Image (spheres, grey):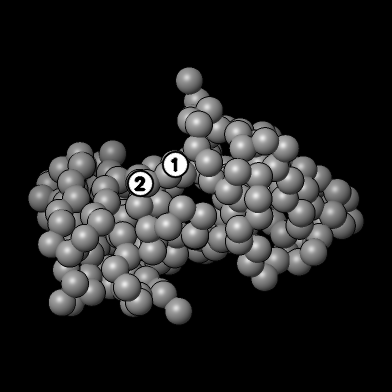
């Protein structure tokens, strides 16, 4: 079945450092790909998405490009802030309403000043 | 103007009790979901409903029973609670034609003593 593998944390960075969180997937067909973020004590918020190969999703300085050839959707940010400290989840969907999102195990990011 | 809301936010109860968690979305979405997040932050689908019809029913004990009185509400009833049911439960919803982008509620932290 479909699956998502993302690097396990925790990832600890200093403010203004460059961030990469790796995510690869296995899927039949052409899934949609998402990054969700969970701040402490809160629910999941959609950070960005890409629905077809070579699409780049971006939001709040974060970016990820849908790479079909490497089945990857790595999350990057050029300069992290303390407020970016959270758990980041990579997820995929076959795009059909009613089907589940399949999540990676989450990566905890901790940014210090 | 809360989009997806859940009540209660925290639920502490004894083993063997029966409890319910309520979810409401005011986004006009057709499809709603329940996910379980375990202590390691791993997220797994439990159920999904589309227009009050059950679509996904993962391998979840029969003690868990979803109820959808209308398409804006999806409640989760749990009978005979066990220690292993302790987790955070998230409700989510998705509109049509958005590649299954899902909107999450704030979560309900269930603790079974």
Residue B21 x, y percent position in the rendering = 71, 41
Return the chain for callout 1: B
**Residue in the foreground of this view, choosing between A93 and A109:** A93
Query: Could you classify mark 1 by the number of other residues whose Cα lies within 10 Å: few (under 14), some (14-19), or many (20 or more)?
Result: some
Q: CA distance from mark 2 to mark 1?
A: 6 Å
Residue hosting label 1:
B95
**Residue in the foreground of this view, choosing between B41 and B68:** B68
Quadrant in the picture for residue A9: bottom left
Q: Which mark is residue A10?
A: none
* Residue at 15%, 54% in the rendered image: A56
Residue A93 x, y percent position in the rendering = 39, 61
Q: Which mark is residue B98?
A: 2
- Residue A110 vs A25, above or below: the answer is above
**Residue in the foreground of this view, choosing between A5 and B38:** A5
SS for callout 2: loop
* Residue at 32%, 73% in the rendered image: A29
Question: Is residue B96 visible to us here?
Answer: yes
Left or right, residue B33 beside residue A60: right
Return the chain for callout 2: B
Residue A22 x, y percent position in the rendering = 24, 68
Left or right, residue A42 beside residue A9: right
Residue A102 x, y percent position in the rendering = 44, 64
- Residue B9 vs A71, above or below: the answer is above
Question: Is residue A13 visible to us here?
Answer: no
Q: Number of labelled discs?
A: 2
The C terminus of chain B lies in which quarter of the figure? Answer: bottom right
């Amino acid at each position: 079945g479909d699956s998502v593998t993302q690097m396990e944390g925790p990832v600890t960075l200093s403010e203004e450092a460059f961030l990469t969180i790796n995510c690869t997937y296995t899927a039949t067909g052409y899934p949609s790909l998402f990054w969700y973020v969970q701040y402490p004590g809160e629910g999941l918020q959609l950070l960005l998405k890409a629905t077809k190969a070579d699409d780049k999703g971006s939001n709040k300085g974060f970016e990820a490009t849908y790479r079909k050839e490497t089945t990857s959707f790595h999350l990057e940010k050029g300069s992290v802030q303390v407020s970016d400290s959270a758990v980041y989840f990579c997820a995929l969907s076959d795009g059909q309403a009613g089907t589940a999102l399949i999540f990676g195990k989450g990566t905890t990011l901790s940014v210090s000043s | 103007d809360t989009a997806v809301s859940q009540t209660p936010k925290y639920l502490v109860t004894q083993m063997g009790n029966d409890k319910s968690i309520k979810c409401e979305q005011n986004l006009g979405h057709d499809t709603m979901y329940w996910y379980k997040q375990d202590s390691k932050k791993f997220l797994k689908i439990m159920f999904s409903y589309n227009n009050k019809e059950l679509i996904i029913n993962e391998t979840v004990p029969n003690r868990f029973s979803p109820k959808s009185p209308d398409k804006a509400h999806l409640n989760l009833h749990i009978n005979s609670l066990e220690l292993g049911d302790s987790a955070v439960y998230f409700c989510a919803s998705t509109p049509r034609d958005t590649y299954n982008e899902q909107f999450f509620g704030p979560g309900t932290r269930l603790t079974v003593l």
